[in-house]
Amino acid sequence: MKRYFFLKWFTILILPLLAVIISIAGCSSVNRKTETEITEDSSMADSYITVGFSQLGAESDWRSANTDSMLETFTEEKGYNLLYKNGQQKQANQITAIRMFIQQGVDYIVLAPATEDGWDLVLEEAKNADIPVILVDRRVNTSDKTLYSCWVGSDFELESKKITSWIKAYTENQNIAPYDLHIVNIQGSLGSTAQLGRTRGLANAARENGWDLMAEVSGDFTETKGQEVMSALLKRFDNINLVYCENDNEAIGAITAIENSGKKVGSDIQNGEIMVVSFDGVNEKALEYAREGKISCIAECNPLHGPRVETLIKMLGNGETPQKFNYVDEKIYSSLEEVQSITVDGATYEIEKP
Ligand code: GYE
């Protein structure tokens, strides 16, 4: 009877009580786990490095590859919080983006500027907010160089010197007199570092070698504009035998215009072909054109700056001072056999197959 009494109370009172105790214990252990996860997450959020990246636009394959390189580098998995803004080719949009980054208190600002001029004011604002600015690809023209920490990109004039040295070597090999070289330059976006360096390089080479540089017109680094500008140039001049395109997208457009006009592109200038040379070596179609000989020579411009910018950010984060100007090594491509190498400013470059 006594045993029965105990069992009865055990089932009625103790068992449910035990169940409640166990479930409370269980709950609290779940709660604790959630708390730990939340704490871990928020401490991670604190350790994220926030990078505001103002890209100038999406005008070319080079630009897309450059943007991808940044997006692939500054990932959450690697501890970054990347704020990416496309400036749609407008400096005003880029300035707005930088002001937004400052307001949000980012750790670093990375700027790929559309043009060189007009950045002083907004860069001063970043400096006053103590946010380091890293320039990528093109440069800015400021009165005060302390307004940005450092820059990484290409030597655009050197790229141009490589192409013009190749043209000189090739035309000499073919016994083409310098004054018989009738050139048009389809320039990049006016006022950008890439345009300024590549235009200067050609103008200097034309002057030094006695080439006939007939016109310089901007094709804005796009295929559409390249085609449009080339069609107009073909109507204006009937003796063009060399088209210097300041990027591959323009070259593709120019080739369409030349072929639509019934002329042939290629390196056989003496037999009426129009030679096309260009810059980048990123666009697959352009590389294919270079293999087929429709583009005679391409000076490489390397867009994979993401990891390079990351190195600079790490250095700044460690309190180090990186070099102010960081240049990238680049190649030169041609499928023609006549020129094997060129020497520019004392350095020799083998001509590589595209
Ligand atoms: O060559 C062109 C792009 O600034 C290096 O801009 C860059 C240039 C590149 O649109 O394709």
Image: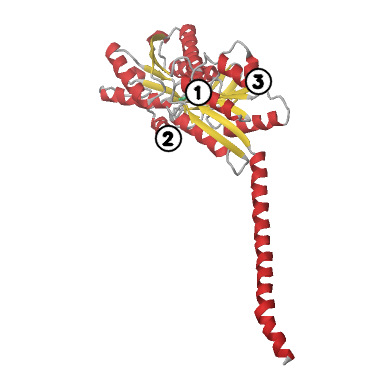
The residue indicated by pointer 2 is 284
Give, as a three-letter code, the residue at label 1.
Thr
The residue indicated by pointer 1 is 96
Please report the residue visible at 55 percent of the width from the left and 29 percent of the height from the top. Answer: 53
Distance between the Cα atoms at labels 2 and 3?
33 Å
Of 247 and 147, nearer the camera is: 147
Give, as a three-letter code, the residue at label 3.
Lys
The residue indicated by pointer 3 is 324
Does dot 1 land on a helix, a strand or a loop?
Answer: helix
Which callout, 2 or 3, points at the residue further toward the start of the chain? 2
Q: In this rendering, does residue 281 appear at all?
A: no
Please report the residue visible at 65 percent of the width from the left and 32 percent of the height from the top. Answer: 311
Residue 267: mark in rendering:
none
Pinpoint residue 236: horizontal percent, then vertical percent: 29, 11
| Distance from mark 2 CB to nearest ligand 1 atom below 8 Å | no
Give, as a three-letter code, the residue at label 2.
Glu
Image quarter of residue 90 = top left
Pinpoint residue 187: horizontal percent, then vertical percent: 42, 17
